[in-house]
Amino acid sequence: MSGSRMARVSLVVVTLLLFADRANAQQASGIAGVVRDTSGAVLPGVSVEASSPALIEKVRAAVTDGEGRYNITDLRPGTYQVTFSLPGFNTLRREGVQIPAGFTATVNADLQVGALEETVTVTGASPLVDTQNVRQQTIVTDELISALPSGSKGYMGIARLIPGMSGGVDSGGSAGIYAANFVHAATLHGKSGAKMSYDGMQIANLAIGGNLGYLVNPATVEETTVESGGVSAESNATGVMMNLVPKEGGNTYKLNVDGTFTNDSFQGNNLNQRFRDRGLTTTKRVLNLYDNTVSFGGPIKRDKMWLLVASRLSGTRTDKPGIYFNKTQGTPVYTPDLDRIAYNKEWLKSQAGRVTWQASPKHKINAFADIQSYQVRGQGNNAAPESEATWSFWPASLYQVTWNSPMTSKFLLEAGVGFSQNGFTYTREQATDIFGFAVKPTDIAITEAATGFTYNAKTNYYDKNQQDRFLERFSASYVTGSHAIKAGFQLEQHVFNQDYVVMSPLM
């Protein structure tokens, strides 16, 4: 190798290592193991193939090294068939190997000498313990979220399924959609703060402590992984790391419909005369709660291009006992309208789509977009309806493009770009549409000194609140049977554009 070429290679290696501490964890799955003959001697040069319907390219392959070890990386979650073959030996096939996200299954093989073409098929339980990685994580599948009565399919529902994790209160489903503060409220074994990623790229805002603007459509998610141990070398942030692994289409057409609905007709209460005598006249009711998703996936061209589209329509409405609409809004006096109890209300509309393209045997490209809007009102706990926040999230969208390239059975390249669009406001005009009366520019917030109850108006409004996030990542992995090295970088940019309006009688 010439001196100039060696200098260029050294520069690339040093650059990757300098950025290695910022490489983002992609939760890659894999299969690894050792191949021996019946005497226990290791076998180099064995061809190992992992095939699954989850792979658009159908098969990923590797060859055992001088120590008989192999490692197949960057596998999608799914069920795999692993085949071992070497001239002079019987072919061995291991079926039904389940691979979740971020899990490396150990699949060893003992090949028998055989003069004839013969295949031995082994069916058994999948490995349950990942002995290849030191990462500690819990995996929540979409089937588990759909099957269990967790109350919602959002972040709160996921938190309740993780041992040792809490994510705030989901009372009657009212917090099932709106989870902007989940990143602050979530704790795992006493460690607070959660970092949310979709396909390995963070989606929370950078400002105001990293709130959530974009809410993931669960119909697009295959699995959710939660890192429950210490921060790995691949992580770009501390705290609880949650990564949502997206679904892709497949070579068969599939339609999935999932729906949840309830209202106050299905709810009981313990409000009896004894409580009424003590002044309690109402209890909190779930007036309605619904969460409906529809997804459709299949091939645009078999083994070449897949499509997945998903739609979500969700909402909740719960009343607020003891708080009523104000009959005399716009005056210094609060007059409760006992016929109109205050309520929390939220709704979400999401339209998402993903295209997976196997451009060549060594290049796979994913393009994803989710355009959504949602609104939340009634978040104040001690305020009349005209003094509560009515958040309108529009636009709130996510766009991502990723590229994966297994250049060889040992060398893997990954890259991705993402744009999380987070725009939300609460203004006087929106209050007009909801309440049927206008909160005028001259109305000011009034707070009772004895009770802390606020009425007449909010203290401030956002006419504009744009908090967008841009992200770029790249990593290179070199994996042998017994050693692995990964280096890369992640860059992030943030837009914070806000108009903050304070209510004043001089406006």
Image (cartoon, grey):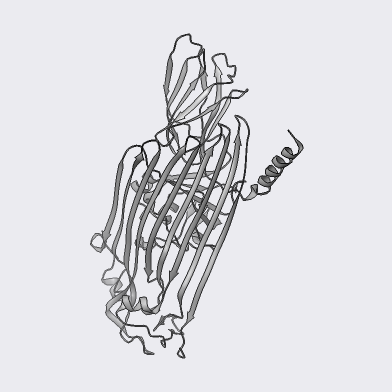
Image: 2 above or below 211: above
Q: Which residue is drawn at 34% across and 46% down?
A: 147
Work out whether residue 361 or residue 169 is closer to the camera in this orientation and state it.
361
Q: Position of residue 481 (x, y in %)?
A: 60, 29
Is residue 115 something one can see in this rendering?
yes
Q: Which residue is drawn at 24% across and 59% down?
A: 266
Work out whether residue 394 or residue 4 is closer to the camera in this orientation and state it.
4
Residue, far right: 3
Q: Where is residue 442 in the image (x, y as percent from the top left)?
A: 42, 88
State the image quarter where residue 391 is shown.
Answer: bottom left
Work out whether residue 316 or residue 72 is closer to the camera in this orientation and state it.
72
Residue 110 shown left or right of residue 356 in the figure: right
Q: Residue at x 33, y 55 (%)?
A: 312
Q: Position of residue 22 (x, y in %)?
A: 62, 51
- Quadrant showing the N terminus: top right
Is residue 148 something one can see in this rendering?
no
Q: Where is residue 80 in the image (x, y as percent from the top left)?
A: 43, 31
State the image quarter where residue 457 is shown.
Answer: bottom left
- Quadrant showing the C terminus: bottom left
Work out whether residue 287 or residue 434 is closer to the camera in this orientation and state it.
434
Residue 479 shown left or right of residue 319 in the figure: right
